[in-house]
Image (cartoon, rainbow, N blue to C red):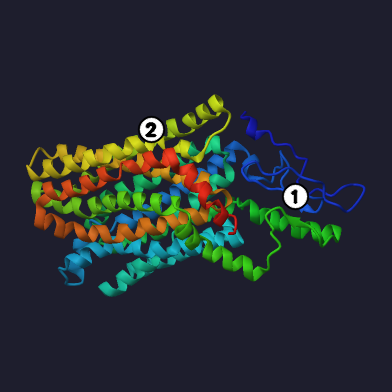
């Protein structure tokens, strides 16, 4: 049995002394820089079974798999309607290219705003209630999309549903809650694997469902599957956010000991109003004052924008250029899916291994040690874009542009997974706010960039159009190189601002 399964049942942080009502002094959580651990400060003990990082390995991986499957469903819901877009337009008697693109990409506009609320509330009230509430809203809005009676109504609900998925904002912070840094990269990679598979398998599933049952069932299926996994979450998921866990422990100990001076190690003595205000404003301040966030956010945003541009145009390319049918065109998305899977498996095997190597060689590791795979991925992505554009433009055998989309998928995952792990490692207990700030840029560009796809290809063609995208991707190769070298300096420079959060 894994050593993590053997959890001592004693040594609770904040345990009351047998001789007095004072709380025993406690060690600092190793990922933080806490000081002034006095007798009235409640914290986790080293082997505290209530600390999520001390939970059994089996349970933590079970929760990781639940998060992964929820990500599949959310990403299925994002793109299942991509191949259904022509049927949706036909149902509402429209032939607008803008509507066709917005049916898929307006979801991303909702995700510009949603993460700020989800992250802030999760750091106020804990991951558990926010995850449940957001998932239930997702189910209800999916039903509303299926029942829509006009295109504006459908687009409105698609925008609102984009605000609700908790997976993009909270999955990585939940992983960070449960896993120490040296095991975190593997877990984040495993969560990302099913989610990106959902993004790619979604069009295939959507094509067959639309052909067999009608476009409405792309939304009904998402609501049904999400409802099943929400029931599983309700049964098995426990709160992982240590700030909330300690807050509840303090409340319990105050009642048991009548010691009103007890406080959590995360309690800075601020009023409820101040805590609420700072939690709401924290992601915006990170975006404005921490240089790492906008730089990494913009890079990931452009990469994700390319993903959605490919997803929203690949059907038209293969139906128009190679004569694929509505049903068979969904299979062309398997190329990008295969590339994503290979990239994720590569990240899974290298991220933690490299971090452990750095710890063994120099005694410590930095968040920037997550970035070397990102450098390699940043070189593969533009190669895939050039190959995809010119192979489709020259009408090469259809397998060639499919392989090219696989290179794009590989480049996508080997840049975004190290970036996500880096953000989580760098911002610790406020990882949800950092992820939300990064996602805001990602989803904003993910909404706008696909709209540029049809005009770009119409004016420049597939070859030169994708070459423009490839040149932009090449111009961003220095980003991970510079962050690997100078990222720590940037974070240190902004630390004065961050500690005020």
Residue 288, horizontal then vertical, whole percent: 45, 60
User: Badge 2 is on which residue?
Assistant: 346
Q: Is residue 269 left or right of residue 313?
A: right
Viewer-side label of 2, 1: 1
Q: Nearer the viewer, residue 218 or 491?
A: 491
Q: Nearer the viewer, residue 178 or 431?
A: 431
Mark sitting on residue 36: 1
> Which image quarter holds the N terminus?
top right
Q: Residue at x 92, y 48 (%)?
A: 19
> Which image quarter holds the C terminus?
bottom right
Secondary structure at numbered mark 1: loop
Mark closer to the chain start, 2 or 1: 1
Q: Nearer the viewer, residue 455 or 69?
A: 455
Structural distance between the alpha carbons of marks 2 and 1: 42 Å
- Pointer 2 local density, CA inside 10 Å: few below 14, some 14–19, many at least 20: some
Q: Is residue 353 visible?
A: yes
- Residue most extreme to the right: 19
Q: Residue at x 21, y 37 (%)?
A: 403
Secondary structure at numbered mark 2: helix
Mark sitting on residue 243: none
Residue 108, horizontal then vertical, whole percent: 34, 60
Q: Is residue 410 visible?
A: no
Residue 409, horizontal then vertical, whole percent: 29, 42
- Pointer 1 local density, CA inside 10 Å: few below 14, some 14–19, many at least 20: few
């Amino acid at each position: 049995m894994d050593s993590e399964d053997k959890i001592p049942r004693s040594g609770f942080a904040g345990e009351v002394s047998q001789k007095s009502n004072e709380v025993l002094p406690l060690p600092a959580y190793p990922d933080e820089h806490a000081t002034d651990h006095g007798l009235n400060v409640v914290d986790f003990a080293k082997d505290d079974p209530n600390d999520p990082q001390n939970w059994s390995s089996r349970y933590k991986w079970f929760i990781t798999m639940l998060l992964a499957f929820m990500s599949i469903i959310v990403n299925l819901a994002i793109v299942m309607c991509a191949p259904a877009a022509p049927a949706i337009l036909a149902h509402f008697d429209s032939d607008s290219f803008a509507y066709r693109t917005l049916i898929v990409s307006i979801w991303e506009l909702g995700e510009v705003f949603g993460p700020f609320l989800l992250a802030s509330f999760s750091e106020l009230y804990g991951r558990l209630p926010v995850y449940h509430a957001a998932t239930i809203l997702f189910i209800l809005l999916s039903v509303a999309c299926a029942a829509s009676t006009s295109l504006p109504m459908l687009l409105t609900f698609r925008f609102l549903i984009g605000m609700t998925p908790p997976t993009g904002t909270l999955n990585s912070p939940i992983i960070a809650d449960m896993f120490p840094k040296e095991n975190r990269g593997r877990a984040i990679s495993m969560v990302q694997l099913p989610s990106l598979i959902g993004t790619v398998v979604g069009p295939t599933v959507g094509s067959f469902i639309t052909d067999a049952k009608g476009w409405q069932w792309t939304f009904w299926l998402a609501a049904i599957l999400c409802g099943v996994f929400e029931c599983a979450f309700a049964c098995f998921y426990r709160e992982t956010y240590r700030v909330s866990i300690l807050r509840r422990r303090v409340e319990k100990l105050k009642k048991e000991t009548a010691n009103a001076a007890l406080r959590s190690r995360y309690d800075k003595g601020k009023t409820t109003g101040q805590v609420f205000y700072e939690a709401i404003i924290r992601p915006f301040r990170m975006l404005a004052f921490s240089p790492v966030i906008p730089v990494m956010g913009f890079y990931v945003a452009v990469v994700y924008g390319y993903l959605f541009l490919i997803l929203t145009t690949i059907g038209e390319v293969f139906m128009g250029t190679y004569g694929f049918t509505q049903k068979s065109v969904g299979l062309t998305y398997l190329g990008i899916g295969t590339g994503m899977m290979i990239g994720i498996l590569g990240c899974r095997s290298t991220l933690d291994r490299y971090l452990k190597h750095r710890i063994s060689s120099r005694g410590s590791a930095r968040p920037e040690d997550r970035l070397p795979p990102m450098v390699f991925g940043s070189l593969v992505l533009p190669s895939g874009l050039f190959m995809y554009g010119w192979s489709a433009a020259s009408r090469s055998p259809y397998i060639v542009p499919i392989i090219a989309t696989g290179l794009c998928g590989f480049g996508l995952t080997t840049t975004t997974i190290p970036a996500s792990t880096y953000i989580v490692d760098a911002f610790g207990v406020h990882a949800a706010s950092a992820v939300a700030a990064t996602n805001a840029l990602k989803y904003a560009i993910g909404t706008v960039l696909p709209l540029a796809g049809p005009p770009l290809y119409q004016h420049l063609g597939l070859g030169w159009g994708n070459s423009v995208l490839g040149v932009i991707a090449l111009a961003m190769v220095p980003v991970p190189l510079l962050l690997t070298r100078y990222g720590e300096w940037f974070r240190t420079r902004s630390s004065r601002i961050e500690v005020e959060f």
